[in-house]
Image (cartoon, rainbow, N blue to C red):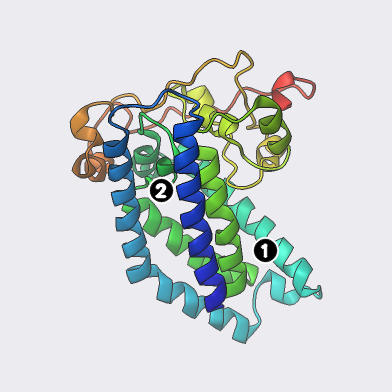
């Protein structure tokens, strides 16, 4: 189990470094002169969240997973299936949960107050993938603890899912100019940069779409899949959170407690996508 944990950390570091380099060699958007400052702020938030997770959540997650395995409770422990099938089901169930949680963060005003820290990034790149408010990380972690006995998840399931999840979210947040044909093929299965850039749009009709973390089929299933048919550049950010003071580490930590115009989201579902629409490609 320790080997899996160490391997996942190694994979994440390698993925981030590789994408960071590719963003500078093949950028989707022109590089900003202040990119290093931008990345430092996002990485600092990521470090704060990693520390909080290790301090407040890690032991609780491990204890709950071990107790669940010992007690043999939860859905997966009640199914008579092979370990391989159990693992595949765990990955799908966890990703389905992430879709629901992500969508809830856009629908519930209280949750949006925290989640808008992530969406307020004016320059989307791989570092945006770890730009979250600590409050959202704690809430997400506690809900995952509750999910473990319900689904019968093991520690191996959790570590393996995160080993898949983290590189994928780094990838789909990246500022890499991926060839359209490659992006089109990849998004048949996973969330890609083209999909997730639409999700980070200032237009709420676009921001309320493409919630998938690993797999894109959740958005197809629940009709929240959306692409820009004209391929025009996306304007990133959140209305009311553009000032330099709000983009500092201190400002971002204060965002959930401010009364900016974006404090509540006038949630609008993504426009229905006809079955034969070219946006489904």
Q: Position of residue 270 (x, y in %)?
A: 59, 26
Could one spot residue 124 in this view of the protein? yes
In the picture, the disc for residue 130 is 2
Mark 2, secondary structure of its residue: helix
Q: Position of residue 25 (x, y in %)?
A: 48, 32
Residue 90's quadrant in the figure?
bottom right
Image height check: is 222 above or below 12? above
Q: Identify the residue at image location x=74%, y=69%.
A: 86
Q: Identify the residue at image location x=62%, y=68%.
A: 157
Q: Is residue 186 left or right of residue 161?
A: right
Residue that mark 1 sits on: 90
Q: Position of residue 65 (x, y in %)?
A: 55, 76
Quadrant of the frame with the C terminus: top right
Which residue lies most toward the front here? Answer: 25
Image height check: is 280 above or below 49? above
In the picture, the disc for residue 196 is none
Q: Identify the residue at image location x=58%, y=35%.
A: 210
Q: Identify the residue at image location x=44%, y=33%.
A: 24
Instruction: Give the spatial CA distance, label 1 vs label 2.
Output: 23 Å
């Amino acid at each position: 189990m320790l080997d899996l944990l160490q391997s996942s950390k190694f994979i994440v570091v390698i993925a981030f470094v590789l994408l960071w380099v590719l963003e500078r060699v093949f950028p989707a958007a022109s590089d900003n002169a202040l990119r290093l400052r931008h990345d430092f702020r996002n990485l600092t938030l990521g470090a704060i969240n990693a520390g909080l997770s290790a301090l407040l959540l890690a032991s609780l997650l491990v204890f709950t997973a071990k107790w669940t395995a010992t007690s043999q409770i939860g859905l997966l422990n009640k199914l008579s299936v092979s370990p391989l099938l159990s693992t595949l089901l765990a990955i799908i169930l966890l990703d389905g949960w992430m879709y629901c949680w992500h969508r809830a963060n856009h629908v519930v005003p209280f949750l949006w107050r925290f989640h808008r820290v992530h969406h307020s990034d004016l320059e989307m790149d791989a570092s945006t993938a770890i730009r979250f408010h600590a409050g959202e990380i704690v809430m997400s972690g506690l809900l995952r603890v509750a999910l473990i006995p319900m689904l019968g998840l093991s520690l191996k399931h959790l570590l393996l899912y995160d080993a898949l999840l983290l590189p994928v979210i780094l990838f789909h947040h990246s500022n890499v100019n991926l060839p359209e044909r490659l992006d089109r093929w990849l998004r048949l299965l996973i969330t890609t940069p083209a999909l997730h850039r639409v999700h980070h749009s200032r237009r709420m009709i676009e921001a309320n779409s493409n919630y998938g973390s690993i797999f894109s089929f959740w958005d197809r299933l629940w009709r929240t899949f959306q692409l820009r048919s004209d391929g025009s550049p996306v304007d990133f950010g959140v209305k009311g959170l553009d000032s330099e003071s709000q983009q500092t580490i201190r400002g971002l930590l204060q965002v959930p407690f401010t009364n900016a115009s974006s404090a509540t989201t006038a949630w609008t579902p993504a426009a229905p996508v006809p079955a034969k629409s070219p946006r489904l490609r």
